[in-house]
Image (tube, rainbow, N blue to C red):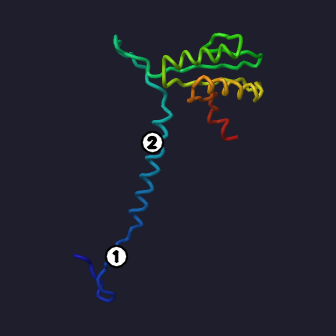
Amino acid sequence: MAASDPQRGPITSINVTPLVDITLVLLIIFMVTARVVVNRQALDLDLPKAATGNPVQEIFSVALPADGGIEINGERVRTDDDLVTRARLARARHRELRAVVHADARVPHGRVMRALDLLRQSGVEKIGFGVVPVPQTERAR
């Protein structure tokens, strides 16, 4: 039953200001908690062994050092054709192959684009770039 004021009549509205305040506080708490959960490092687990287990995904690493040349999965190759050949072989083994290009900051843009073009010619469509995350203290500057 609604309360009434003899001079103004019954109170028929609800004050939603406290509800909005509580909702905003809960939203802020969830946002902070979600950020802490996402920033947490991977757990150190001792996973069980299985005879039928497969790796989750295959990564094809292409490194472009500043001194020239190309490294594939840590092994230096001589020509662009070697990159194309190895990428095609890796893609034949893993249809969902992902390539990660690690280019030195001093590598010219043209070399990076050439590597991307060679990977696409090989049929690799999922390509990412390796970076080093900037610490939180340096981001504020």
Where is residue 27 drawn, in percent x and y? Answer: 44, 52
Distance CA(mark 1)–CA(mark 2): 35 Å
Rendered-image quadrant of the C terminus: top right
> x, y (%) of residue 4?
28, 82
Judge left or right: residue 67 versus residue 101.
right
Q: In this rendering, is residue 51 above or below 139? A: above
Instruction: Please name the residue that numbered disc 1 is placed on.
Output: 13
Q: Which residue matches tag 2?
A: 33
Category of crowding for the residue at label 2, using alpha-carbon neighbours closer than 10 angstroms: few (below 14), some (14–19), many (at least 20): few
Q: Residue at x 30, y 86 (%)?
A: 9
Residue at the (49%, 40%) spot, across then down: 35
Q: Residues within 10 Å of mark 1 (few under 14, many from 20)?
A: few
Q: Secondary structure at mark 1?
A: loop
Give the vertical position of 137 relative to 74 (above or below).
Answer: below
Q: In terms of sequence position, does the residue under pointer 1 or pointer 2 come before the other?
A: 1
Q: Quadrant of residue 51?
A: top left
Give the SS element for disc 2. helix
Query: Residue at the left extreme?
Result: 1
Image coordinates of residue 116 in percent, x first then y, are 66, 27
Vertical placement of residue 117 versus 77, above or below:
below
List the single residue furthest toward the bottom. 7
Residue drawn 66% across and 19% down?
A: 63
